[in-house]
Image (cartoon, rainbow, N blue to C red):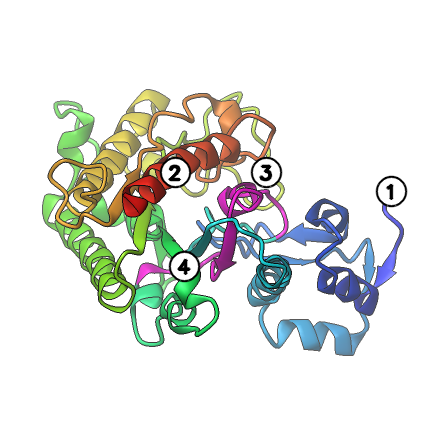
Amino acid sequence: MAEKKNFDELEAMLADPDVPDAAIRPYLRVVPEETRPFVPVVQPDPDRVVLRPLDEVRARGFGFLDWANRWSRRRRYARFMRRFEADDPAPVLVSEGDSWFQFPLFLDDTIDLLAPHYLIFSLDAAGDTLINMTGPGREYLEPLFDPKVGPRVRGLLFSAGGNDIIGVEPSPDGDVPVLAKLLIRRRPDLAPAAHIREDELEKRLAAIETGYRRVLEEVAKHRPGVFVVGHGYAYAIPAFPGDPRNPRWTKHGGWLRDPLAALGFSEPSEQRAIVRVLIDRLYERLARLMGGNCPSGAYPHGWLVDCRDILAEVNDWADEIHPTDAPGRGFARVAQRFHEVIRNALAAATS
């Protein structure tokens, strides 16, 4: 059992970039009742960390999600700057994304696993949305304009849009699953794909495309020669009877299985089929843009990572929408697929 610490000792560990995330995890917990899709709420574990009243006020003043995101970003930035100032020759990349790029402290995610190969200026935050990333105050532009970092940036890694397809949206009566808006109630005479409300899906895909176009055009305008790498997630597996996954951070099944069951889709095969169709539609929309490796893509400096088929087994997933960080599975496979595309983008930019 981990030695009990006070809040200052925990934050001292977080402030030291040489302390690995794995050594910090025993002192943290994710709160299932507050966690939403792509938004894990991480906080000190009260069984491992002594929280005085002022400590809790201090942490909750930022909101525990922001507390974990903030520390994750600070740790990544410290590691980046140490290598950058030591003239590490690895290619410099900027990353802006959601919980596939930063699942704060609890999972070794895509960026964690790419970091040994690249110098990554991480702006990622669990819970970040496409609207926030591409709206006013666009953070991904800051390192591009930085007089020291900007000239060395070779590419931008971008992860966004998942919330628009399988997330939740607030309403006066509480959060509403996006799936409830995207689908009609199950009819036995219709194939799974025929249950999609095409007007609603098109509205959301158009918004995602608009956000990606903005990123691609601004990067080309401000740093010609810098490539952009995006992705369309993977064929997620809704929870099912006998499911071996048991994530600590959420009520398993609440993100995909339960919203689909509420619409009458009780069979796991039907649920998976609907998720596959939605992921395919998102990927196909992004392929219109990413001309680096998609034949009809509009932007030659855009590259698309196809993760759809690489997480086919339940053991590749930590929960319904996040890959596992088990060695050789889940996020390791996602990072390898990113690594392959990044290498091709670097070679194309050099040539």
Disc 1 element: loop
Quarter-wise, where is residue 65 in the image?
Answer: bottom right
**Residue 318: x, y in percent?**
54, 35
If you read the primary sequence from the N terminus, does the residue marked by circle 1 or circle 3 appear first? Answer: 1
Magenta stretch bounds:
105-130
Residue annotated with mark 1: 1
Residue 260 placement, left or right of 212: right
**Residue 295: x, y in percent?**
14, 35
Quarter-wise, where is residue 17 in the image?
Answer: bottom right
Q: Nearer the viewer, mark 1 or mark 3?
A: 1
Amino acid type of the residue that numbered disc 2 sits on in the rendered structure: Arg
Residue annotated with mark 4: 153
Amino acid type of the residue that numbered disc 1 sits on in the rendered structure: Met
Q: Is residue 110 above or below residue 309?
A: below
Residue annotated with mark 3: 247
Residue 338 placement, left or right of 19: left
Q: Nearer the viewer, mark 4 or mark 3?
A: 4
Query: Which numbered disc covers residue 343?
Result: 2
